[in-house]
């Protein structure tokens, strides 16, 4: 096992110098001061302060006891936490998560094509290859890994790309841009031209022959539309806009006039629509894609009312229960679209989800059924539990400081009509 600081030195990594630069903080201007007043920003900053120095992955569910969740650092949660730290005016802290992502990309135990896994072991990243979550099964007397965690979802990697571009834009170094480019090149292989054309879900399972997830997600394609657009702007390379436009067009095809909503995407049979109405499939297009807030926002009022529960919003029409992330996403959209009264009401609902340590619970109830089947067992529904959750904390921070993780600024995408 090679120590990562030795390997990094050989490859030009300088993560010990990732502390927040004064110039980068000044560049954020009023945003830095604004984020300092956010309870979620302060909790996220404290969480980072509790970690050992250097690159780090944060635990997604710090108090979890289940072996599948304990010490697991999901890529999506860490990427959105890095984006929230940028919004909170803490680019140096964001860079530590970004550095962990870069090391994981460069030092996978098998892959060398730029992809990232869905999860890593939480904690300092000091050994390579970067460790993946798993546990010892005493009954079967073998080491077990979760097939989803070791896979590579397209949407999770889109958020990692956004986080890396954000770190680069914050003045933390060109290696972040290089990592985003490498990830972007890998993700082009997930594009499927078969109708409806769009980016597939990614891969499921471990090496050397993971299963290809043929389904296509509205949320994933919205993520990728924004990630490729931000990369094109940061790199000054218009060629990436081609991929942003492809993802954007998929999201447009998912619009269902009959229900005034976006379908979740395609099902296991890629040509069939998944008509489940999920919150993120409604909100991410508005936050991520130019013109969508103006064109589709007013048309979504009815379905958003249907998704409301106890002042907040639930994960999908499959079940009731306040979903913290979704409620924060809606609060952020309301805030950036000028609906301040509604945004403040949602922020008050989010305050009820705050844990004693300052973090935020994933859901207000004991459990929240999503309506989607588990990748590892489609007969069972994916469920959120009443546990402190890094993703929830990060989204609340974004809502409180008014920072859109898709545009990397305190505003929605530029307003223009969809193509």
Image (cartoon, helix red, strand yellow):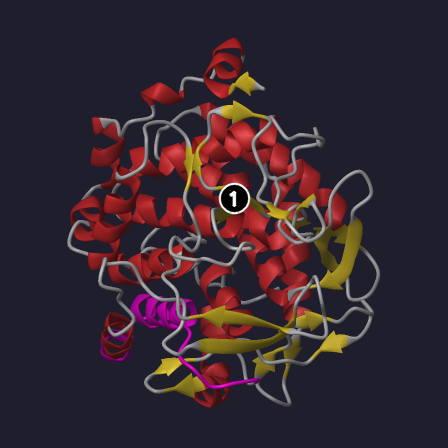
Q: Quadrant of residue 96?
A: top left
Magenta range: 318-344
Above or below residue 161? Residue 414 is below
What is the magenta segment's predominant secondary structure?
helix
- Give neighbour class at mark 1: few <14, some 14-19, many 20+ (Cα, 10 Å): many
> What residue is disc 1 on?
160
Q: Position of residue 309 (x, y in %)?
A: 39, 86
Which quarter of the picture shows residue 166?
top left
Residue at the farthest top position? 10
- Residue 169 on image: x %, y %: 39, 35
Q: Is residue 169 visible?
A: no
Magenta stretch: includes residue 8: no
Q: Which quadrant is home to the N terminus?
A: top right
- Where is 64 relative to 52, above or below? below
| Element on which disc 1 rests | helix
Quadrant in which residue 89 is drawn: top left
Q: Looking at the picture, tell me which residue is in the foreground, 376 or 342.
A: 376
Magenta-colored stretch includes residue 321 = yes
- What residue sits 24% from the left and 79% below the top? 345
């Amino acid at each position: 096992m090679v120590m990562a600081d030795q390997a990094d030195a050989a490859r030009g990594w300088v993560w010990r110098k990732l502390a927040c630069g004064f110039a980068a903080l000044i560049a954020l201007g009023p945003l830095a001061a604004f984020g300092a007043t956010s309870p979620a920003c302060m909790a996220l900053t404290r969480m980072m302060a509790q970690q050992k120095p250097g690159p780090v992955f944060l635990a997604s569910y710090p108090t979890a006891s289940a072996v599948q969740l304990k010490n697991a650092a999901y890529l999506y949660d860490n990427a959105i936490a890095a984006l929230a730290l940028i919004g909170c005016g803490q680019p140096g802290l964001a860079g530590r998560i970004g550095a962990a992502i870069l090391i994981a990309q460069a030092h996978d135990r098998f892959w060398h094509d730029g992809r990232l896994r869905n999860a890593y072991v939480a904690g300092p990243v000091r050994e390579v290859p970067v460790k993946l979550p798993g546990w010892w099964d005493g009954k079967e007397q073998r080491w077990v890994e979760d097939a989803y965690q070791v896979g590579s979802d397209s949407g999770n990697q889109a958020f990692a790309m956004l986080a890396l571009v954000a770190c680069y834009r914050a003045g933390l170094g060109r290696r972040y841009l290089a990592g985003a480019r490498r990830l972007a090149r890998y993700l082009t292989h997930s594009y499927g031209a078969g109708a409806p054309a769009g980016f597939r879900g990614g891969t499921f399972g471990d090496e050397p022959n993971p299963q290809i997830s043929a389904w296509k997600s509205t949320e994933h394609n919205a993520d990728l539309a924004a990630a490729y657009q931000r990369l094109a702007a940061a790199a000054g390379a218009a060629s990436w806009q081609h991929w942003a436009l492809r993802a954007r067009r998929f999201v447009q095809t998912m619009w269902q006039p009959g229900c005034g909503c976006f379908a979740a995407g395609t099902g296991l049979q890629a040509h069939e629509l998944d008509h489940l109405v999920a919150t993120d499939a409604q909100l991410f297009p508005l936050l991520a894609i130019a013109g969508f807030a103006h064109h589709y926002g007013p048309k979504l009022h009815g379905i958003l009312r249907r998704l409301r529960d106890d002042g907040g919003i639930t994960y999908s029409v499959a079940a009731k229960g306040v979903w913290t992330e979704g409620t924060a996403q809606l609060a952020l959209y309301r805030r950036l679209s000028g609906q301040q009264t509604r945004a403040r009401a949602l922020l008050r609902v989010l305050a009820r989800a705050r844990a004693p340590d300052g973090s935020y619970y994933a859901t207000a109830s004991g459990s929240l059924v999503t309506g989607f089947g588990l990748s590892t067992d489609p007969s069972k529904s994916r469920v959120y539990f009443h546990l402190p959750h890094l993703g929830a904390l990060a989204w609340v921070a974004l809502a409180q400081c008014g920072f859109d993780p898709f545009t990397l600024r305190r505003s929605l995408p530029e307003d223009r009509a969809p193509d």
